[in-house]
Amino acid sequence: MNIKLFTGKKQRHANKRAVTMLEYLRRLDVAIHTEDLTVAYNNEPALWDIDMEIPKGVLMAIIGPNGAGKTTLLEAILGLVKPNAGHIHIFGKPSKKQRKFIAYLPQRTNVDWDFPISVLDMVLMGTYSSLGWIMRPNSASRRKALNALKMVDMDEFKDMQIGELSASQQQKIFLARALVQDADVFLMDEPFQGVDQATEKTIINTLRTLRDNGKTVAVVHYDLQTVTEYFDWALLLNVRRIAAGPVKEVLTEENLHLAYGGKSSFLSMEHTITSGRVKNQATAEKKDV
């Protein structure tokens, strides 16, 4: 498509509309876009000025040291925490209007596994958002849940209480609950944590299937040794965005030093929060290596 940019004072608004259209076309292949995203807790930045684009159809690792803001990034995209500044777009539109396209798998420890509910009922909970408040899961929902359990090799356990499962089995049904949501974007917080090798293989194969079907999958991941094997895209964080892109371009020695060498290795930050925004008074530090 050719978009003509006009000149002259009278055409200022036409130029603005044309540039907006160019930006829209550029974002057609972008699942998640953040701009100047900043989140702080008690005057302490958890994320600072994050500009990021996650393309459609990638399997992406979100990596960085403890306290880097990985979980906070997921929560900001989901609207679970309110940014102090910046914007988030899902498929080119404000995230608040697009959350129906997202499935979320939080950390397994966030669930009360002693709650008296069966495996099948746990997975069926993932269909509630599409059914509404009044309707109850029907036979179609049940078939969808059973198919999801089969994908993660847990269909034989459908009638078991969730509290009777091992940690690895619990993680698999947690994943199945996300699968039944028929989302276009899957956000997952450390899905491999505390699972055995066989379960890890089942999970990564499931995530690859999602990617191969055009879904976008973003995973908070802690094991740098498996990033190159498991993922094709990566985001490296340490409060700020260090790097993002194809895995081999992100996992360089320089980038890893910036991320894991400590926050002070790349930025010394003095900050205040005024009128709901975080003001940056950062200065670069010189550090002998």
Image (cartoon, rainbow, N blue to C red):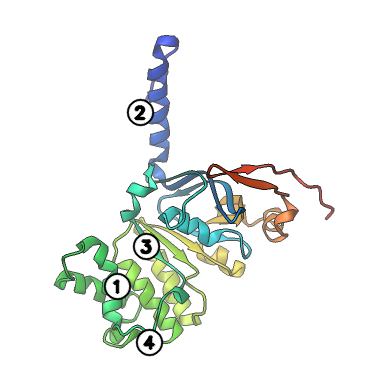
**Tags 4 and 3 touching, CB below 8 Å:** no
Instruction: Give SS at disc 1.
Output: helix
Mark 4 — residue?
A: 163
**Residue at which label 2 appears:** 1
Outermost residue on the front side: it is 275
Identify the residue at image location x=25%, y=66%: 128
Dot 1 amino acid type: Ala
How many C-alpha atoms fall within 10 Å of the one at disc 4: few (<14), some, or many (≥20)?
A: some
Left or right: residue 203 versus residue 72 is: left
Foreground: disc 1 or disc 2: 1
Q: Quadrant of residue 224?
A: bottom right
- Counting residues from the N terminus, which is met first, the one under dot 4 or under dot 1? 1
Mark on residue 148?
1
Q: Quadrant of residue 188?
A: bottom left
Instruction: Using residue 171 as the reference point, say whether residue 177 is left or right of it.
Output: left
Within 10 Å of disc 2 (Cα), the crowding (few <14, some 14-19, many 20+) is few
Residue depicted at 44% across the width and 68% down the height: 106
Query: Mark 4 vs mark 3: which is more N-terminal?
Result: 4
**Residue 38 location (% of width, % of height):** 55, 48
Name the residue carrying label 3.
210
Q: Label 1 neighbourhood size at 10 Å, few (<14), some (14-19), many (20+)?
A: many
Identify residue type, mark 4: Gly
In the displayed structure, 220 sits above or below 98; it is below
State whether residue 11 is above or below residue 115: above
